Amino acid sequence: KQEVTQIPAALSVPEGENLVLNCSFTDSAIYNLQWFRQDPGKGLTSLLLIQSSQREQTSGRLNASLDKSSGRSTLYIAASQPGDSATYLCAVTSGTYKYIFGTGTRLKVLA
Amino acid sequence: GAGVSQSPSNKVTEKGKDVELRCDPISGHTALYWYRQSLGQGLEFLIYFQGNSAPDKSGLPSDRFSAERTGGSVSTLTIQRTQQEDSAVYLCASSIGPDNEQFFGPGTRLTVL
């Protein structure tokens, strides 16, 4: 059974710092891995999707990497801003169409 | 519409009442998914539709939960005889097909008193 874990559970950093969020999964036979952000009381906003054949994806200040063999993905946020404060979720699919979500990292960027 | 929409955005109901939650997927998306986000439980899969059929209902927590999809578009999640533990945010997502990127709606926050 696929399990997805995110570390740390919560993170508080001063504005401007570069930071790394971690996601690990127990079954390396994944199809896609996707990073989302969720603002309080809101739905999910897709940030980056990495297909199993890819190693990383970049969008603006965000970079996500994938290492299937070790069952890990990292989300790198450069020059963090208060507007980045949210909960970050990673999710994987294993060819069975349903996403298995991680436990999330609550990020707070202090001005 | 441009994205997945859900209604209502908030629903407060009394224990024992039935509720219906609606999802309008992105036009042309054949796959539709329901998830539930409970406090302390994270996000969990409920049901998947391909067209109007639901090949995977494995995540529905009890027989009080049912869902249907008509015309390959709108889906309704029905919860009968609601219980307090049903309180959660119910999220709907759609994708062009299975194993494609899923796009999520804003969710319906259900509170059962």
Image (cartoon, coloured by chain):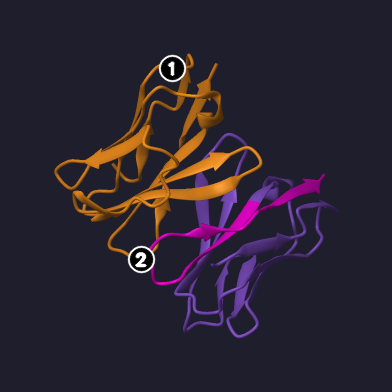
Residue labelled with disc 2: B100
Label 2: few (<14), some or many (≥20) within 10 Å? some
Taking the magenta stretch, the answer to whether it contains residue B58 is no
Amino acid at pointer 1: Gly
Taking the magenta stretch, the answer to whether it contains residue A97 is yes
> Bounds of the magenta span?
A88-111
Palette colour of chain B: orange
Q: Give the x, y percent position of residue B18.
A: 36, 21
- Give me the chain letter of mark 1: B
Residue labelled with disc 1: B16
Label 1: few (<14), some or many (≥20) within 10 Å? some
In this rendered view, identify the residue nearer to me: B44 or B62.
B62
Q: Image height check: is B89 above or below A16? A: above
Q: Which chain does purple denote in the image?
A: A
Q: Residue at x 39, y 63 (%)?
A: B101
- State how many labels appear: 2
